[in-house]
């Protein structure tokens, strides 16, 4: 008769294997739930509950993941605008929005960003009455440069003949460049400059003569 050895601990080993498999499944489920809950705020009670069911290494790992998720959620919460806005804040926002344009009466003329080139062009426009003495302009009421304005380009009409149009090579980007390239303006500017210098010399000669008379006294 043959005798076969029978292990008495077979039931206990099976139970241990089942427990281990359950723990592994539990760990996997927790990790999956953490991945899915990347946008959900997790309180500290849940972190402690999850850490109790796993070993020390996985518990530390999970707690660090949860802290990271909490930090991301806090950053998202900070970016969310408040539901209730104060009256003062509403008035300030309305004022800022209103200052962006001149208003409906001016067809919402925008407040253009001021640059050095635009500033020079606006100053030339304000001094246009002295640029050409033969042309009459209305008196400029504004002593300060305007805040609301727009710069446009004149498009040549197809009806005009080619000779009456300005060639592309002669077109300039700013009014200053146009004036510097204008021969008539250069002559007039030079003439006015010499006249001013002569006046200054005459005035300085009279001033020197009066000083000599005072010294002789």
Image (cartoon, grey):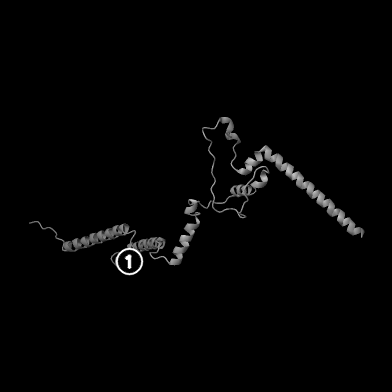
Q: Quadrant of the N terminus?
A: bottom left
Q: Nearer the viewer, residue 184 or 96?
A: 184
Q: Tell me what residue is drawn at x 84 percent, y 51 percent.
A: 205
Quadrant of the image occupied by residue 30: bottom left
Q: How many marks?
A: 1
Among all residues in the image, which is located at the extreme right?
A: 216
Camera-nearest residue between 211 and 138: 138
**Residue 149 position within the rendered picture, expressed as x and y whole percent measured from the top left:** 54, 50
Q: Position of residue 59 (x, y in %)?
A: 33, 64
Residue 97 in the figure: left or right of residue 126: left
Considering the image in quadrants, where does the C terminus appear? bottom right
Residue at horizontal 58%, vertical 32%? 164
| Mark 1 neighbour density, 10 Å: few (under 14) some (14–19) many (20 or more) | some
In the rendered view, does 44 fall on the left or right side of 109? left
Q: Residue furthest top?
A: 162
Answer above or below: position of 86 versus 137: below
Asked if residue 51 lies left or right of residue 134, the reply is: left
Q: Secondary structure at mark 1?
A: helix
Coordinates of residue 34 in the picture (x, y in percent): 31, 59
Which residue is at a point 43% across and 66% down the rendered structure image?
87
The residue at which mark 1 appears reads as: 47
As displayed, is residue 123 above or below residue 66? above
Query: In the image, residue 29 lies at what x, y percent?
Result: 27, 59
Q: Quadrant of residue 44?
A: bottom left
């Amino acid at each position: 008769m043959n005798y076969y050895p029978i292990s008495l601990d077979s039931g206990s080993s099976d139970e241990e294997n089942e427990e281990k498999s359950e723990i592994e499944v539990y760990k996997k489920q927790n990790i999956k739930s953490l991945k899915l809950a990347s946008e959900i705020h997790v309180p500290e009670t849940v972190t402690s509950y999850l850490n109790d069911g796993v070993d020390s290494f996985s518990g530390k790992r999970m707690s660090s993941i949860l802290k990271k998720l909490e930090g991301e959620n806090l950053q998202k919460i900070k970016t969310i605008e408040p539901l209730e806005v104060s009256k003062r804040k509403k008035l300030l926002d309305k004022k800022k929005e209103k200052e962006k344009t001149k208003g409906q009466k001016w067809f919402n003329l925008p407040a253009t960003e001021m640059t050095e080139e635009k500033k020079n062009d606006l100053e030339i426009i304000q001094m246009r009455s002295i640029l050409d003495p033969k042309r009459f302009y209305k008196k400029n009421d504004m002593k300060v440069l305007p805040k609301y304005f727009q710069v446009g380009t004149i498009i040549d009409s197809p009806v005009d003949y080619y000779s009456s149009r300005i060639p592309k090579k002669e077109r300039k980007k700013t009014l200053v460049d146009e004036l510097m390239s204008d021969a008539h303006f250069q002559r007039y500017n030079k003439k006015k400059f010499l006249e001013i210098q002569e006046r200054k010399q005459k005035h300085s000669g009279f001033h020197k003569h009066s000083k000599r008379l005072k010294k002789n006294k």
